[in-house]
Amino acid sequence: MTALTMVRQFGEVLLAIAIAPLFTGWIAQCRAWLQSRAAPPLTQPYRMLRKLFQKDVALATHASALFRMTPYILFGAMVLVAAIIPSIATDLPFARVADAIALIGLFATARVFLSLAAMDIGTAFGSMGARRDMMIGFLAEPALLMVLFNAFLLSGSTALPSVVEASTAHSFLMDPSLLFAAVAFLMVLLAENARIPIDNPATHLELTMIHEAMALEYSARHLALVEWASDLKLFNYACIGFALFLPWGIATHGADGGLALGLAVAVLLAKLTVAGAALALIESLSAKLRIFRAPEYLAMAFLLAVLGLLVHLLLGA
Amino acid sequence: MSLVEGTSQSVVAFSKHDLSFLLMLVFGWVILGIAGLVRPHRVGWIARILFPLGALIALGIAGLGTLALFSGHAPQIFLLPLGLPNLPFHARLDTLSGFFLLLLGMAGAGISTFAAGYFRSGEGTAPGLLCLQYHVFLASMALVILADDAYFFMVAWETMALSSYFLVTAQHRIPEIRRAGFLYLLMAHIGALCILLSFGVLQGGRWLFTFDAMRGASLTSFWASAAFLLALIGFGAKAGLVPLHIWLPEAHPAAPSPVSALMSGLMLKTAVYGVLRITFDLLHIRYWWWGVLVLGVGLFSALFGAIFAAVQTDMKRLLAYSSIENIGLIFTGIGLAILFEACHLPLFAALALTAALIHSLNHSLFKSLLFLATGSVLHATHQRSLGKLGGLIRRMPWVAALALIGTLAIAGLPPLNGFVSEWLLLQSFLFTPQIPHAFLNMLIPLGAAVLALTAALAAYVMVKFYGVIFLGQHREPSLVHAHDADWLERMGLAWLSLGCIAIGVLPQLALRAAGAVTQTLLGQTVNLASPFWWIAPITSRQSSYSGLILLAGIIGVVGITFVVVRILAHGRMRRAVPWDCGYPWQTSRMQDTAEGFGQPIRHIFGPFFDMERELPFPTDAAPRYRIHIEDRMWKALYLPIARGVQQLADWIGQLQGGRLSTYLLYSFLTLIVLLGFVL
């Protein structure tokens, strides 16, 4: 493990932390354009974070230490996930520490902590949000795992960098199973990141909210961290999608000099731009589902992922 | 492997007497139990002296179990001068028994320490008698693991069943507890009968009942399968595999909490031990369909347990169903191991078996921890119903903090131990496409999906468990008086949570322990060559994981975030009433109840439940909402069997008219028939 590798690893994480709010801002901007509204500036999420960091925390009277710890754990988990995903380069020392299964575990850790924190205050909305988010979580997790399983079977490894290297080397992207997996992954991405059609990130409409309900009692720097963590989560999901289905441009092992890295950053930004616009389009075209239609939606994602797996096994046999 | 060899040289002089030391320690437990009868009502004598001594013995047993794992010796055999004339009890210590003794000792030490602070007078059975039953229970579990002939095994097995029956019915004045105890005893004996029959098949017509003779017996494929199926039913009834799980959610809540911990954490593992002993040691051949069967039953049990745990409203019943789930996961691993082994893929079999063994160890730690935590809650609040708890994190910070570790561990979150075994299990599912059967290699990868669903549901269940008990506001005003556990109870809990952290952070330790077992049973271990902070069970390209570095990463990132936020932002904070969208009249009754939290599960998995709902009318003056959920297995399987038995009994009962002349006629007819044989 050379110093250069470490620099690359830290650089990637810092880039993720820095541009995650930008990605959210870009989606919001595209959505506004699509809906013929005046768009907020791209830097709106940063201004929001800055404002929140300056405010005083108003903490509920009987909030426990768990409630105050959670924003930090949430943020930490998302940063670690960013360290595992090969968004720019595949030579990531940290990816050997925790593979893609551990990545699902880290997402689950973040979800469990946020749900526990939401129940800590003991308000009606908090526990309702926790219950709903855990429900979405346990439905989405098997689908995500099946998508990843597909990639594992194709590449023979559960570490995401190895998956990317295998897919760029053997170009198994033409494998039809990945098409099913990609659709399933997109559905999971929307559900897990509290976006339409499962949740609406833009409203405080009490009876339908999920993620907002859990963050309801947070304020100031705690809220800033929770929001930043959810920006990072969306960014991470997008990067997982790129790694699995659009791995072009990621600097692979051995070919990751300065030029290649610069190119990789540029390609990543281009991919994020397109993906953000596409997400905004999907969100503008679809309507929010009733909460009890969510199981059907996620069951469909799961079945698509399983179908992909079956296609792979049938063709492989 | 260098570590294993290094240990073997240093203990070579000592290990010859391991087994006799072990047996002495086990009898030490029995003596402690008898000592409890000397002064059966002196809590100070029993709780402060005998139980801590029992914990020390447990530690000794764990230590000797570890030695047996790593000494690399041939199995040791010891003849006990007990039992029938010419039929001495055979005891044997090999790596498999060493592993389970390690499990028994590690968790047992924590539970006994906790029990030292927990048991007090005035709760059902006298403390002295409880002490005897408790230690006999522990000793019989150790002897089940050490037994090397069918007689000794069955004697120890029955002692285990009986002593735990008395412990379950400690509060025998409550009718439900008597009923639960009876159900438990019934299922235990159906299981024991099947195990006995299995041994009967295993001896293969030579009428030698030592395990050594059974290893040499050559069975045809039919009889081998019969022995395996009987053992699966027999041990499955003890382990709580669906549909033989029915006693588990009744008996575990009925018992005092340390006993629930022993039963769930340790006794269920003796069943796992039994299945492994018979399948991988006594039987000389394994067929692939056994693996598929065990895998299917295991996955179904896991899913079933998780779904039912999610709708429970009694905290101990919730944990009991969660035990069914975890046992299901263990049997999933065993099923995969059998399947791989039968398909001549020993490395993958070793991986799956390692996952099953480590999950057994993990479950014994975190499930004991959580059952003990419910014991502390029960003592502090006198409430078992989740609907009457809440907010205890502020009254019982120690129990809440330690239970949080158990909760996160059982939810399978990194970097704790539950994640390690689930990770290994998922890794083994990755190799199922290599099975040389056309349909199996397509169907079984889908098992990974069921596994993922179960793991995610387990997280749901545990958020419910922890959130409803420890978080939020007090649901009853009396909870303000709840007090934290005393220092012995805390020590017991802390020991178990330390185990959860240690295995999670350094999984290599558990991997090596399980590796010694797979080496004996399968002649193969997973790749152990990596350094101690790292695991890469197949190759490091395939997959690798390091709990230690992950934990360091989490602590580092969270610490840096905290410091940076403190430097960049100010630390000002004020306390205010909760916001809750500006609604000021919040009461503690507006939080989600246990029923409310289980509602999505009832909605999604409706067909699993036998639900009875009572909804109020809008015009009701005193509206009442009631929901009753029952296991479909009762109506589908057990009640018909019970009715059948009853009918058969009624039918046979007609023979008994109560008239002397009829009985004389029966005797006469019997004599005639017997004469027919003789002549």
Image (spheres, grey):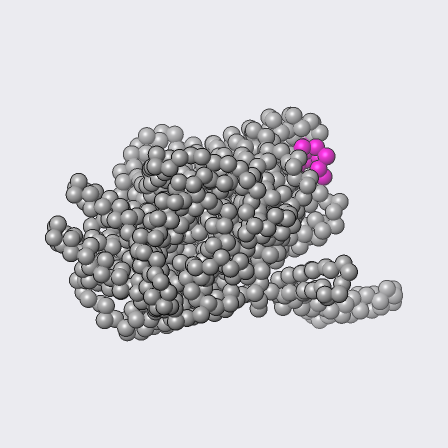
Q: Nearer the viewer, residue B420 or B428?
A: B420
User: Residue visible at 32% across and 56% down?
Assistant: A41
In this view of the protein, which residue sits in the foreground, A125 or B202? A125
Residue B166 at least partly seen: no
Q: Measured from the top left, where is residue B348 in percent x and y?
A: 33, 56
Q: Residue at x 40, y 58 (%)?
A: A193
Image location (x, y in percent) of residue A94: 27, 46
- Relative placement, left or right, of B178 versus A21 is right
Residue B123 within the magenta-colored segment of the rendering: yes
Q: Which residue is farthest front?
A: A38
In this orientation, does residue B558 appear? yes
Quarter of the picture containing the N terminus of chain B is top left
Main SS class of the magenta portion in the image: loop
Question: At x 84% / y 67%, what residue is drawn?
Answer: B657
Q: How many marks?
A: 0
* Magenta stretch holds residue A159: no
Looking at the picture, how far across and down is residue B103, in whole percent?
Answer: 47, 41
Left or right of A92, for residue B545: right
State which region is magenta: B120-130
B470 and B317: which is toward the camera: B470
Residue shown at the point (86%, 64%) measured from the top left: B658
